[in-house]
Image: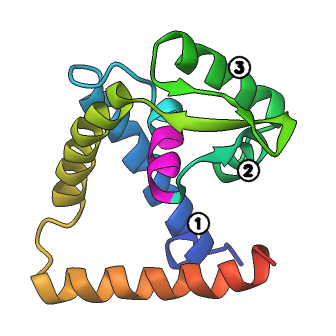
Amino acid sequence: MPIELEKRFGFLISDVGRLCGKRFDDLAKSSVELTRAQCRALAYLSRFGNVNQARLADLLEVAPISAGRLLDRMEEGGWVERPANPNDRRERQVLLTEKAEKTLDTARRVGDEIAAEALAGFSAEEIEQLISMLRRVRTNLSSIVDQ
């Protein structure tokens, strides 16, 4: 009996994420000077504030060494700063620069355009319900995963 992937929650969530990511890459080429991974890093820093490299790697779901390389390129480009943590000099904090803050607005506009495309044909009420349900799903999983 074949698995009906179109009815599998995890598959659909993953596939929607994949498609949104590809669309972001297409739209961002002309307006954002950063890769999708770099934009994600900025978005997480904007959401969670200054975090250390290990926490950012966890949020990005990459190995700490990969996050370090990503941040090296971002620091060279003036997108982030990585001062030592005053309470633990072995640890580096990651801070957004003013340049990054300005670019985040552009990246958000790209994200808004993708959301409008993805949600075309949905009523405002349906969009609100979908967002609310996805937030509940995130809360449910966060309570298990982020313990």
Taking the image as shown, residue 141 lies to the left or right of residue 126, namely right
Marks 2/3: CA–CA distance: 15 Å
Q: Per the image, is 147 magenta?
A: no
Q: Amino acid at mark 2?
A: Arg
Q: Which mark is residue 115?
A: none
Q: Amino acid at mark 3?
A: Arg
Which residue is pictured at 64% across the width and 23% down the height? 70
Crowdedness near tag 2: few (<14), some (14–19) or many (≥20) residues, C-alpha within 10 Å: some
Label 3 SS: helix
Label 2 SS: helix
Q: Which segment did they paint magenta?
A: 40-47
Q: Position of residue 16 (x, y in %)?
A: 44, 59
Taking the image as shown, residue 47 lies to the left or right of residue 100, namely right
Crowdedness near tag 1: few (<14), some (14–19) or many (≥20) residues, C-alpha within 10 Å: few
Tell me the quadrant of the picture where the N terminus can be found.
bottom right
Answer with mark 2 or mark 1, whichever residue precedes in sequence. 1
Q: Nearer the viewer, mark 2 or mark 3?
A: 2
Kindly identify which residue carries mark 2: 55
Q: Nearer the viewer, mark 3 or mark 1?
A: 3
Marks 3/1: CA–CA distance: 30 Å
Residue nearer the viewer, 40 or 97: 97
What is the magenta segment's predominant secondary structure?
helix
Which residue is pictured at 34% across the width and 19% down the height? 33
Marks 2/1: CA–CA distance: 26 Å
Kindly identify which residue carries mark 3: 69
Kindly identify which residue carries mark 1: 11
Q: Is residue 58 above or below residue 142?
A: above
